[in-house]
């Protein structure tokens, strides 16, 4: 059943979660957009990736959800309206939007290319603006966001592939580019471990390699070994093998933890394979209840650090797209035409880990009666 | 009662813990030194500081202790014997030894000034050498250690003051010199928080200031406020005051946790006051049972890191002594003549926190009949 064309700009339409118990069954819903600001840009959405955050938000795992809620923050589409002060985009541009929709641009963090950590940041969905409006995401006909968080997409990258770069790609690029050491002594090549080969991990392998690091993939079983090498890994470690860490003492500058959950994660073993002052960086966000349970003792053998990284800056997004063009980095995606049934299929299969490696919802113009603007 | 002169070099004498239940009552004991190696240096001890580690080791808090055990690793004295390959020291030199007595000098860590993280490191006491000999520390007539871990003491620094620099000073200097950012944009002055004003903390304040950072002291109550300012702090925060963290958002590059225990530590509040990519570094080693219980979520607001730092390198020790001479940095010490009663007084009072800010045991020549060499 096709839906009636959305009555844009009076309303947006999207597939919204109405109840966390029914998290995998978003329903077609129309809603009022937030007020335009001088810096607002409207994107008529062409496609949107499915991020693990969409599932955890829909399930209420991060502490509730404001329903109805349209998730989705790997958005690509066309600029169809701009506020009076917008200078970064013009009507008709093909652009992307990731997980952050607004920031103050006035604080030290914003001014130092750390706007993802701005205290006034508004995420792309399920986050309140100062006026009380709750942001709505990209399983939708349109999205409205601040021009600064919207990125031009290079012609070389297809929309369906650009989508996952806006969140998954940027989220792994930022810590890798910040923490892979430059200028190691004696021409040493930096070494990176990617932990968990999924939507984030499979991009991290390609990006880490492009940034010049020798890249290892760590996965529970051997199942993803061959694909890891295809993505550019130089080694593969199955952690179900007892004692895997023994031969890897003092090996890694960065371990990027792309796994969503912490359960079963032998953090002591992973810390032991870091070089002095190496970093264990988490980018996968688990349920709020999950904790690292670590003793300060654990770190004393190498002065290693435990940290997390969130998203990336606009500058990093632009650098990432350039890197992807130059090194032919693309997400491996499965496309699903968007609809209630399509959302359910994507969410259910992604939650079961049944995706290689990222779902992207497509055919938005058909679903929402858009595309003629 | 004076003890008979020690029969050096056939034996060393020291005050040894014989039972963790009697941790505060070391007894006068003689014991065989380890075998000389070509790189061994014997120090005839003049004085030795009391470190929190001495107490936790004596109590068996770090998982047992090999008795009889002489603790103490803030040692200053005179070189009285050297191995055939020693080049760094000569007979009669005044030298110091901290918490590390040996390392391989052959691994990457040793070669890159990270020998404190050498996998073959032997600590100054309660640690087995490859031949099975258990190292014995500095509440003793003599100590034998590798020349590399023994440091020349500048003439400007008295032995009793140099002692605490060898462990407490070096332990805080290493993370401060590594992690205080250089060349912040727009002439910003780096900002450091010292958490806990004790043996480690009171040196950290002086060192942090000498390294050019604006230095805040965090302590539970106001009791140490005045002394903090005397040591060079620019601000003082009493954490018993509800909401102390509110005005400090995004303020610190480094938080150095010098407190021994984690109990009562509001780690979320401390992480919230770090700048983007700031570091919370622990140098105080708690009981092995204590854990940080942190969610990856906690770090997402600023990409901050949690880490520990152990000791420092030889290079850092030499740099520290130079810094102390240049900036007139000295520990604030209370001296106790060494004896069974003196050890008990020092250990008991230090465990109760009744010291401003470091005990140093003195009059070793009298206790052991040494000093004529």
Image (spheres, coloured by chain):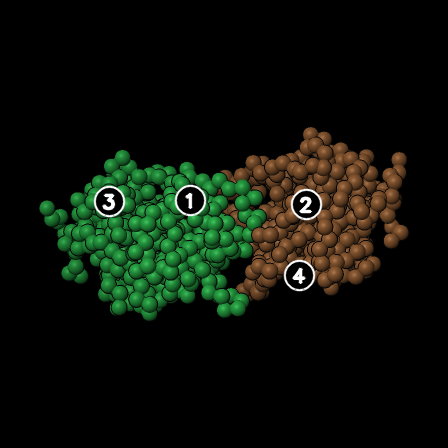
Chain colours: A green, B brown
Residue shown at 24%/59% (left/top)?
A160
Label 1, on which residue? A242
Residue A363 at least partly seen? yes
Q: Secondary structure under badge 1?
A: loop
Asked if the residue at tag 3 contacts the one at tag 4, i.e. Cβ–Cβ closer than 8 Å, the answer is no
In the rendered image, residues at marks 4 and 3 fall on the same chain: no
2 or 3: mark nearer the eye: 2
Labels 1 and 2 touching (C-beta < 8 A): no
The quadrant where residue B103 appears: bottom right
Locate residue A371 relative to residue A239 in the image: left or right.
left
The answer to whether residue A276 is left or right of residue A125 is right
Point 60% across, 52% down: residue? B120
State how far apart marks 4 and 1 are (Cα): 38 Å
- Observer-nearest residue: A231 or B203? A231
Q: How far apart are marks 2 and 3 (CA)?
A: 59 Å
Q: What element carries label 4?
A: helix
Q: Give me the disc on residue A349.
A: 3
* Residue pictured at 36% horizontal, 46% vertical: A220
Assign a secondary structure to mark 2. loop
The reply to whether label 4 and label 2 mark residues of one chain is: yes
Front-lying residue, B10 or A130: B10
Q: Residue tagged by mark 2? A: B133
Distance in Å between CA atoms under marks 1 and 2 = 32 Å
Give the SS element for disc 3.
Answer: helix
Q: Mark 4 points at which residue?
A: B315
Q: Marks 4 and 3: which is nearer the front? A: 4
Horizontal arrangement in the rendering, residue A292 relative to residue B172 (left or right): left
Q: Where is residue B140 in the image (x, y as percent from the top left)?
A: 78, 44
Instruction: Between residue B279 and residue B102, name the one nearer to us.
Output: B102
Outermost left residue: A1
């Amino acid at each position: 059943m096709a839906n009636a064309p959305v009555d844009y700009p009076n309303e947006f339409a999207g597939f919204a979660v109405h109840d966390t118990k029914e998290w995998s069954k978003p329903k077609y819903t129309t809603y009022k957009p937030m007020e335009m600001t001088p810096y607002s840009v409207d994107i008529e959405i062409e496609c949107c990736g499915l991020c693990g955050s969409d599932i955890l938000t829909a399930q209420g795992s991060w502490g509730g959800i404001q329903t109805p809620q349209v998730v989705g923050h790997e958005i690509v589409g066309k600029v169809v309206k701009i506020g009076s002060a917008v200078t970064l985009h013009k009507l008709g541009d093909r652009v992307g939007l990731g997980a952050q929709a607004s920031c103050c641009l006035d604080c030290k963090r914003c001014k130092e290319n750390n706007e993802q950590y701005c205290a006034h940041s508004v995420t792309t969905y399920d986050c309140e603006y100062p006026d009380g409006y709750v942001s709505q995401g990209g399983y939708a006909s349109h999205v409205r966001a601040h021009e600064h968080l919207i990125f031009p997409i290079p012609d070389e990258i297809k929309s369906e592939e650009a989508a996952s770069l806006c969140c998954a790609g940027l989220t792994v690029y930022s810590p890798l580019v910040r923490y892979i050491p430059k200028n190691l002594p004696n021409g040493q090549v930096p070494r990176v471990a990617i932990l968990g080969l999924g939507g984030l991990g499979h991009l991290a392998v390609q990006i880490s390699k492009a940034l010049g690091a020798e890249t290892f993939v760590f996965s529970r079983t051997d199942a993803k070994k061959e694909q890891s090498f295809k993505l550019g890994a130089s080694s593969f470690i199955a952690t179900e093998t007892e004692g895997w860490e023994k031969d890897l003492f003092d090996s890694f500058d960065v371990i990027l933890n792309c796994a969503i959950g912490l359960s079963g994660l032998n953090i002591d073993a992973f810390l032991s394979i870091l070089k002095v002052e190496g970093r264990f960086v988490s980018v996968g966000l688990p349920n709020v209840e999950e904790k690292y349970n670590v003793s300060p003792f654990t770190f004393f053998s190498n002065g290693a650090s435990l940290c997390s990284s969130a998203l990336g800056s606009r500058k990093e997004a632009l650098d990432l797209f350039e890197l992807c063009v130059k090194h032919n980095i693309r997400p491996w995606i499965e496309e699903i035409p968007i609809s209630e049934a399509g959302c359910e299929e994507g969410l259910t299969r992604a939650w079961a880990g049944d995706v290689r490696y990222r779902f992207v919802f497509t055919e938005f113009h058909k679903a929402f009666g858009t595309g003629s603007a």
